[in-house]
Image (cartoon, rainbow, N blue to C red):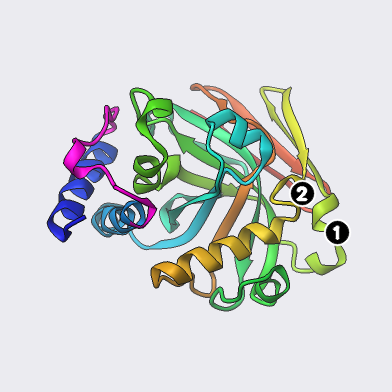
Amino acid sequence: MEPSEIKAAAELLSYNRLALRRLEGLPPHLTPADENDAYAIQAEVNDRLAAAFGPRTGWKIGCTTPTMRRFLSIAQPCAGEMFRRFMLPSIAEVPRRCFVRPGVECEIAVELAKPLAGRTREEVADCVWAVQASIEIVDDRYEDYAGLGVRTLIADDFFNAGCVLGPPVTAWRELDLAALEGGMWVNGTKIGAGRGADILGHPLEALAWLSRRLSQLGREVPAGAIVTLGSLVQTAWVNQGDNVEIEIGGLGAARVRFV
């Protein structure tokens, strides 16, 4: 895509997001032709949103588990950026009116001690300071996300609207991350469960994927950034008044209420 087309697509996506409007789709000439175009538009979108949302200090990775790949009919991992303003502590209260159609996911997150680098699980592990339980808040900002296409979803940060973080576990190397079991409850009803191994065989494989993919794009994840690694359970759509809790063995819990 031409730079002018990338900017025009980003203008439409950022406007829709700030206005809380449902996106029907991008015009054909502004629809990303490949994933590199999609990530270029995403970067431009987030440059524009930063004026309203502030710094972005994290990344989310989607479609890393069989559950989510089946749910979205998307075969490969996808990434989006996150803003510091929407990285919330556990037991947070979040206004329902801030979303088009909010959803929640049960995730393992990592916080980086140094800039993300490396191609293998072992190499990226050296960058991790802490691991924690996380609720990703997603937003279905679309008329029909199934028909929108993966590249447009990537351009719009792949549904991300924020995250709720449990306490950081710095002694995470004492844990078998692949064996950790997690579950999610909405208003006390269990929605689903999964294991760390569901995330590309091991949670840090998702982090290695992000490192490789961003390296191809000439991007970097800085020290201190939070990265959520993919949902262990299928997305649950929530409403005003709903209480959400996740718990991951060895990492603890995180909670959020939509008010």
Q: Report the Cα–Cα distance between label 1 and label 2.
A: 9 Å
Q: Do the residues labelled 1 and 2 touch (CB within 8 Å)?
A: yes
- Read off the residue under disc 2: 196
- Residue, far front: 33
Q: What stretch is highlighted in magenta?
A: 20-36
Q: Residue at x 78, y 49 (%)?
A: 197
Where 121 sits versus 185, above or below? below
Q: Which sits in the foreground, 13 or 76?
A: 76
Q: Does the magenta stretch include residue 24?
A: yes
**Which secondary structure, mark 1?**
loop
Q: Label 2 amino acid?
A: Gly
Q: Label 1 amino acid?
A: Asp
Circle 2 Cα neighbour tier, 10 Å, few/some/many (<14 / 14–19 / ≥20): many
Whether residue 256 is visible, yes or no, is no
Q: In this view, does 22 lie to the left or right of 85?
A: left
Circle 1 Cα neighbour tier, 10 Å, few/some/many (<14 / 14–19 / ≥20): few
- Read off the residue under disc 1: 176
Q: Which residue is drawn at 55% across and 49% down?
A: 77
Q: Is residue 130 left or right of residue 50?
A: right
Residue 194 lies, in percent from the top left, at: 76, 38
Q: Is residue 32 magenta?
A: yes
User: How many discs appear?
Assistant: 2
Residue 5 lies, in percent from the top left, at: 16, 52
Q: Residue at x 64, y 39 (%)?
A: 255
Q: Which of the two labelled residues, at mark 1 and mark 2, occupies the earlier sequence position?
A: 1
Q: Is residue 172 left or right of residue 22?
A: right
**Which secondary structure, mark 2?**
helix
User: Magenta part mainly helix, strand or loop?
Assistant: loop
The image's mark for residue 42 is none
Whether residue 179 is visible, yes or no, is yes
Q: Is residue 217 left or right of residue 172?
A: left
Q: Which residue is drawn at 44% across and 54% down?
A: 82
